[in-house]
Image: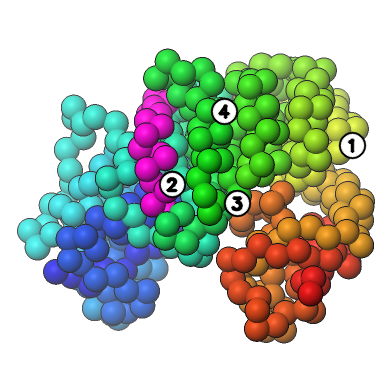
Amino acid sequence: MAKIGFVSLGCPKNLVDSEVMLGLLTRHGHEITATQSEAEIIVVNTCGFIESAKQESIDTILEMAEQKVSGNCRRLVVAGCLVERYRREILEQIPEVDAVIGTNQIPQILDVCSDQLVREIPVNGQAPYLYTDSDPRLLTTPSYSAYLKIAEGCDHPCTFCVIPTMRGRFRSRTMESILAEARRLVAGGVRELNLIGQDTTMYGWDLGNRHGLAQLIRELGKIEGLPWIRSLYTYPNTLYPELLRAIAETPTACKYIDIPLQHVSSRVLKRMKRGGNRMSLEKLVGRIRAAIPAVAIRTTMIVGFPGEAEEDYRELLDFVSNVQFDRLGVFSYSDEEGSGANDLDDKVPEELKDERRDRLMKLQARISRRSNRQLVRQKHPVLIEGPSAESDLLWQGRLSTQAPDIDGVVYLNDGINDGVESGQIREVLITEVFDYDLVGNVAR
């Protein structure tokens, strides 16, 4: 058995794949090490979503390849999305790579890490992969929080995205499998479950259940010892009223909607193959807020999509100013090989994309700070995460409306004592706010 180092890049969905691979490796006797120089085998689970992610993956592969000279590494394995897009190129152009496996070959991590090296697993005729509760997982998130992948793949035709090419058609796990894994995670100390998939709103549709996510949230709400359930990546075109009711009526469901709109100009949305327009999206946001009191809505926007004119961008700015999202992320469009948008004309210059991104983020910063000010002198439940990376003198936590790693945090500058521990949910008095983060004291 080997000592294995693991590097996981990209989104939480990729992280779950890494955790399953780590679980499989440890189940079969391999030892996992966090010290790369000690590792005999290094696995890099890559992201290939956008250009910056691809470059980070390549840089990380090359960095880990140096361990074959300076460390104990005798084998370098590349896994994940980048393999699905550039399998042959990786093997031919990076000779330090000894083996590759794609996103549908997760169980084959055992083959490429075995004593008998298998360089490439054939992909012909291989069924799309979807893990179950019987597959082991070695959590890499804090012990109190976990991601729970409920579906894999995507059927949407968005022209800026190549996920269907990398991940395949949409497919749901059975509810029984998800609930079994959820109970096991809670029994192990998890207090926050974040449901993920390329489109969580469509969960169950392929199994004949059009209200699958709503039913799943209600069932998860019955699990004792699970105070926070949060659903991420809800798709706007498939968001349905019963789901909103389930979130509103399930006490442990976080009143949080993560709904990537990407744009509001009907002309841009048509080129994106997303559908809708500003009026329909404003109505959608209104329905969400009417259905779930005190809901926090997070969205993402893409600026600089091919053909985005100044009037399209001004419409986007005006929309964001009027709607006042609680959380908003902005991405500059980048061409991706194999995507429909890659061949579109009227490309937006890079410097203009950056300028539009910065203007929109400055607008959102003002909106966010204004919203945060309303929380001052109020007490809110906060999930205590532990010491902050920002300062040895601070601890930090999150509101139920702050998802891990993508939203702000609550810094705790007073009230910490021996009774406060990571994983607890404690009442915190908010005393100060910034654009995205809050400051507070743990109530005594």
Q: Amino acid at mark 2?
A: Ala
Query: Within 10 angstroms of label 3, few (less than 14), some, or many (20 or more) residues?
Result: many
Q: Which residues are magenta?
A: 167-185
Could you give the CA–CA distance between mark 4 and mark 3, rounded to whole angstroms?
Answer: 17 Å
| Disc 2 target residue | 182
Looking at the picture, does residue 410 appear above or below residue 235? below
Inspect the magenta stretch and tell me whether residue 170 lies in it: yes
> Contact, CB < 8 Å: mark 2 with mark 1?
no
Quadrant position of the N terminus in the picture: bottom left
Could you give the CA–CA distance between mark 1 and mark 3, rounded to whole angstroms?
Answer: 33 Å
Q: Amino acid at mark 3?
A: Pro
In the foreground, 272 or 327: 327
Label 4 SS: helix
Label 3 SS: loop
- Left or right side of 97 for 406: right
Q: Answer yes or no: is residue 54 visible.
A: no
**Badge 2 or badge 1: first in the primary sequence:** 2
Could you give the CA–CA distance between mark 4 and mark 1, rounded to whole angstroms?
Answer: 31 Å
Label 1 SS: helix
**Badge 2 or badge 3: first in the primary sequence:** 2
Measured as percent of width and height from the top left, residue 211 is found at: 54, 21
Q: Which is in the foreground here, disc 2 or disc 1?
A: 2
**Badge 1 or badge 3: first in the primary sequence:** 3
Could you give the CA–CA distance between mark 2 and mark 1, rounded to whole angstroms?
Answer: 39 Å
